[in-house]
Amino acid sequence: MSRPVPSFSFIVPALNEEKNLPAVMEEIASVTGKGGVLDYEVVVIDDGSTDGTFAAVAELSSQYGNIKFIRNETRQGVGKSFLAGVAIAQKDYCLIVPGDNEFDLGFFPGAVAALSVGDSDFVVTHVLNPRLRPRHRRVISFLYLYVFNFLFRTAFRYTNGIVIYPTGWMRSVKLLSAGYTFQSEALLNAHHEGRRFAHTGMNIRPRVHGKSKIFSFSVMWEVMASLVRMKLADCQAPHTEANK
């Protein structure tokens, strides 16, 4: 038996994304309508932008009316920005939607249906068209996922896409990382707790404005250090792992 359609908090970290945010908001409005979602909010976190992101959000707020706004005076990173959004989110579920408009949200109506059925706690996406990305990025993503699954005996197809979390759970979980690996760690915690996952494919698209801010030596170092911390914590934690 289906449950009532849940409510959603779309959390949008944005660093110099003034030109991309209007398309992000338009797509959120579109997919919520297609999914029958009447109750949703958008939390935009301006992560120390130096362009017109602040003005863009102000204009969008007058147009849509359900936008909350957080402004970081200095750059905090995608993980901390997302968690700041979670802290003020008020809906049943929350999900990160990067402000660069790279992720196609066409999967969302199906995810709503899966959650409404009631046999899944989380929705985890994987990329259907990875060849759209540069080869070096595909190689790095493949290696990271291989190492992650090997270290923690999991079988995720992707951990850094869009994940739909129960908001209360996400607010309560204790994470060691607030950087690019925060979603991997959150999913690992959920896996150990025996939570139920619905898996769905998601398309990506080329960035229209600006450049990717993901890959740098500092980010790679952060990722490796986070994996070490997660493995050390994993060795000491009790595991349920009742689901796959």
Image: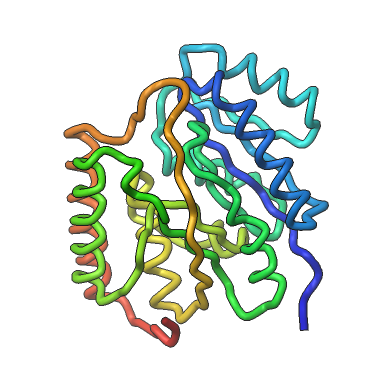
Q: Is residue 14 above or below residue 131?
A: above
Q: Quadrant of residue 189?
A: bottom left
Q: Is residue 7 above or below residue 113?
A: above
Residue 234 in the image: state x and y as whole percent.
Answer: 26, 71
- Which residue does the image show at 69% across and 48% down from the upper left? 31
Give the side of residue 137 with respect to residue 119, left or right. left
Q: Nearer the viewer, residue 68 or 25?
A: 25
Colour style of the rendered protein structure: rainbow
- Which residue does the image show at 77% across and 36% down from the upper left? 66
Q: Nearer the viewer, residue 215 or 92?
A: 215
Give the side of residue 108 with respect to residue 214, left or right. right
Q: So how many labels did they put on this image?
A: 0
**Quarter that holds the N terminus:** bottom right
Q: Quadrant of residue 63?
A: top right
- Which residue does the image show at 56% across and 38% down from the upper left? 12
Residue 90 in the image: state x and y as whole percent.
Answer: 71, 51
Give the side of residue 183 with respect to residue 151, left or right. right
Q: Is residue 162 above or below residue 25?
A: below
Residue 72 in the image: state x and y as whole percent.
Answer: 50, 26
Residue 211 in the image: state x and y as whole percent.
Answer: 36, 24
**Quarter that holds the C terminus:** bottom left
- Which residue does the image show at 64% across and 26% down from the upper left? 22
Q: Is residue 98 above or below residue 34?
A: above
